Amino acid sequence: MTIKKDDAINHIHADFEELANLVLEQLDLMEQVIISGEIEVPDEDLRRIQTNEKDIDKREVKLSDKIVNAIVLYKPVASDLRWIMACYRIILSLERIGDIVINITDFIKKIKTPEVYEKLREVLSNMTIQSIKMVRKSLLAYLNDDREFAVWTIKNDVVFDEINHKLLKKIIAKTDTAESNKHLLMSIVTIKEMMSNIERIADHATNIAEAAIYSIEGKDVRHHKLDQ
């Protein structure tokens, strides 16, 4: 029974890493598109993003089933159970991050005023790079039992939101926005939605980091102030 349980956990671990790497690939593709400053997503990138999204959904379902089976069939001990439950929480966040990548590529295609997008490109790029860094560190926290990376991710989420809200207000204030210009206003609204989605990526990174701490320490830090 112990050998079968260990094999089941090892398979979950391997499948989890594949799913995590696929989501990180999606984020890298999204980063390339945003940093380019173009409002046309290259067809090749769009096809890869859409294909990867279908693969992510399939892997999430498959991995969830394996987790349920491992718990029911092998009744893992407390430390293994914490790791498995943290894994389940994380794959839900990874699947949602994949959905957000699709949302953001759709928003880019809706922008009708490239000059406004160009003015906000630096902010969007910085937000994207930082949110992806948070996702990477949170995943490493879980995979390597690295509490320091988890704490870094959680504490950076607050700073991330505050800084980028301030930058957005400053740049929009400097933008010549004629209220009669429907395309201009719609572009600003669309870009704001993009920023909100990028912020949600950072939020999911925090969720992953919180699950990592649960796996490492057995402590649920959600909705609580995090100790150093």
Image (cartoon, rainbow, N blue to C red):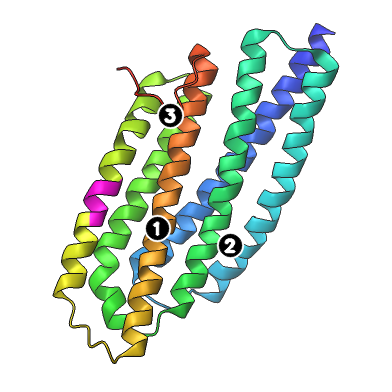
Q: Tell whether label 3 touches label 1 (CB within 8 Å).
A: no
| Residue type of the residue flagged with mark 2 | Ile
User: Closer to us: mark 2 or mark 1?
Assistant: 1
Q: Identify which amino acid the numbered label 1 is placed on.
A: Ser
> Which of marks 1 and 2 precedes in the sequence?
2
- Asked whether 162 falls inside the magenta stretch, the response is yes
Residue 40 seen: no
Quadrant into which the N terminus falls: top right
Q: Which residues are magenta?
A: 161-165
N-terminal label among 1 and 3: 1
Q: Nearer the viewer, residue 191 or 130?
A: 191
Q: Amino acid at mark 3?
A: His
- Is 225 above or below relative to 193? above
Q: Considering only vertical position in the picture, is 71 above or below 188?
A: above
Left or right of 95 on screen, residue 187 = left
Q: Residue 49: give its label.
A: 2
Q: Residue at x 32, y 54 (%)?
A: 127
> CB under 8 Å between callouts 2 and 3?
no
